[in-house]
Amino acid sequence: MQGDEACAEGAIVAGCRVFAGYPITPSTEIAERLAIRLPQVGGVFIQMEDELSSIALIIGASYAGAKAMTATSGPGMSLFMENIGLAFMTETPIVIVNVMRGGPSTGQPTRASQGDVMQAKWGSHGDYEIIALSPFSVQEMFDLTIEAFNLAEKFRTPVVLLADEIVGHMREKVVIKLPEEVEIVNRKKPLSKESFLPFKPDEDLVPPMACFGEGFKIHVTGLTHDFSGFPSSVDPGVHWKLVKRLCDKIRLNSEKIIKIDERFMEDAEIIVVAYGAPARSSLRAVRIAREKGLKVGLCRLITLWPFPQRKFLEYAKHAKAFIVVEMNYGQIVREVERCVQGKPVFFLPKMGGDPHTPNEILNLIYEVNEDEF
Amino acid sequence: MNFEDHEETHPLDNLILSERMPHIWCPGCGIGIVLNCYLRALIESNIDLNNVVVVSGIGCTGRIANYVALDSFHTTHGRAIPIAMGVKIVKPNLKVVVISGDGDLFAIGGNHFIHAARRNVDLLVICVNNFNYGMTGGQVGPTTPFQSVTTTTPYGNIEHPFNLPYLATAAGAVFVARWTIAQPFALIKTIKKALQKSGFSFIEVIAPCITLYARYNRLGGPSEVLKYLLQNSVIKNGIDPALVDIDKDKKIIVGEFIDRDRPELVKELYRIIKEQSGLELKSIVSGG
Ligand SMILES: Cc1ncc(C[n+]2csc(CCOP(=O)(O)OP(=O)(O)O)c2C)c(N)n1
Ligand SMILES: [Mg+2]
């Protein structure tokens, strides 16, 4: 099965019943598959007039009580930005898939890239936090789509699946698990209508979610609001409290969110950091280096945002150097540099759509290995 | 009179959130009249108020969502219609009503308007046409009459406005009407009718912005504007919407222009679900 198709199947298993989108390479197969599959399981697929309306529609659908998703690539992601802020501010669980292609602008529609990593984190205006996951196989296109829904529902926040054209279009064997075989998280619901405040958080900082048509008569707004949900947009205290909580919801729970795939890391002196498609060639390079007796490990990031900064502080205590492999001109490498306390960080960028070859990575590993630290 | 002892109630007390008063609208603003007519139409229609959702965009008109004791969503600028569609698709039993401004619905959100009308999704869209961008200080918009003065057309508007009923009709709306704030009872009646329609219904309400448009174009204060609207409106039910364009020197043609039927989007979506899954669903809520 293809990565994009596995993503569509994962969405269905996660309970997604509404998809709205606008065709764009290399994500279109997700839409095409869901156009067939959703009506078969009692769901709705709708192709919208653009990406602005696609994300808007799924926000409305989520507030009516459905799990909902959209999928796109860079140009469409740029159009999502304002409503990613709306979803964050109104605590709307939605899943956004970005199968990254070469940018900026129309760029390389059919070639892979990892150029939208910083955009996912910083692209919408104001202070916000995003959860972004990076699949490196067709199986993970399936598994992480489910994970994305679970995180969105658990934290009432938009979650991005940041895939790339290679994993989106690649074909591999995939195990389609049944809903009974995986953990499925559904949003917390309010226990009673008595003096219910729709945006009053529980201890986990997440408020139970009342939806439209449930008799709560809730007001939802992108304006700064208090626990009642009604706007209070000039009081500095209300704004500070709200935005701080919305960010802390993710920052303070980051240990629960973050997933890393560590290979050969026990005694690693050189740590290769990669995610998505380049993590595949990185793994190969690290294996070969190990066969040659070099103390090299792979840290494959599954969660890109929130960035696992604590983990990197730990790594920095033992590792001698880091090699960051990305299909862009320098994005996650900045986070690594920020977190490793001045330890040397080598960067292996690549743009144009071809993934790094294991040899390219291996050569840098050898070079770094010969350096004296 | 002691205010505390005052026991008289307002007929809309249950629907307007008095604790949210005062509202943000200027004295004499027509948006209040539209809100009043809308809420009265809801009450007179005997609709279960737990099943009504108001969705609005950004602007003075968009603030309507902030003051009603109903499920309501105050969205992003221009995106009220697709958000309302999302709600309607998941819970077709809800009456989803979009109330927003001319700029919100026809400039930044214009594409969504024509596509929702084309799809014939069951929504009622009420546009308060105040001839400008009220919230941001009276700039020109897509409905500002030719040659009018606004803060961004200081030498007169050289562009021509949309004829909104004509646009809605051409795009596929099944019910199209226009009134001004000087005909509130007709407006209530029309809203009631539109609430019963299945499909995309559109009502334009002419309510010139008192503080900005009326001042820059020397239309006078609230009572002069109401008098002007009353004297210059002509009721022509059933007239071809191509003929109802608004121009400074022309009468404002009002009435119910279009009432027709076409297959409705959400019903069709559920028909496909039934055909493909055998499920006869009333909603598509996840996990429930
Ligand atoms: C993306 C975006 N652009 C611009 C604005 C600023 N803005 C707020 S309201 C508004 C215009 C509102 O005009 P209209 O829809 O006619 O509503 P009115 O205030 O006249 O009722 C604009 C441009 C915004 N909020 N968002
Ligand atoms: Mg306006």
Image (cartoon, rainbow, N blue to C red):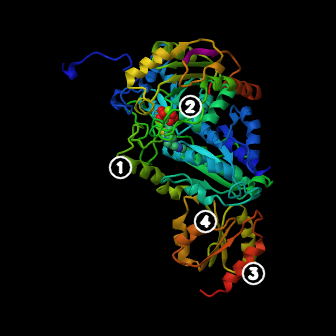
Per the image, the residue denoted by label 2 is B146
Q: Mark 2 against mark 1, which lies toward the viewer?
A: 2
Magenta residues, start to end = B252-258
Residue A19 rendering spot, x and y as whole percentages: 67, 39
Question: Secondary structure beneath disc 1?
Answer: helix
Which of discs 3 and 2 lies nearer the camera? The answer is 2
Q: Is residue B286 visible?
A: no
At a point 67% along the width and 63% down the height, the residue shown is A275
CA–CA distance between discs 2 and 4? 53 Å
Which quadrant: the C terminus of chain A?
bottom right
User: Foreground residue, A311 or B95?
Assistant: B95
Q: Label 3, on which residue?
A: A292
Between the C-alphas of marks 3 and 1, the distance is: 60 Å
Question: Could you tell me how far apart the alpha carbons at marks 4 and 1 are, in whole angstroms?
Answer: 33 Å
Q: Distance between the residues labelled 2 and 1?
A: 42 Å
Residue type highlighted by circle 2: Phe
Estimate the x, y position of residue A158 in percent, counting from the top left.
56, 47
Question: What kind of element bears circle 3?
Answer: loop
* Marked residue chain, label 1: A
Q: Position of residue B22 (x, y in %)?
A: 33, 31
Disc 3/disc 2 C-alpha distance (Å): 79 Å
Residues indicated by labels 4 and 1 sit on the same polypeptide chain: yes
> Chain under label 3?
A
- Picture disc at residue A236: 1
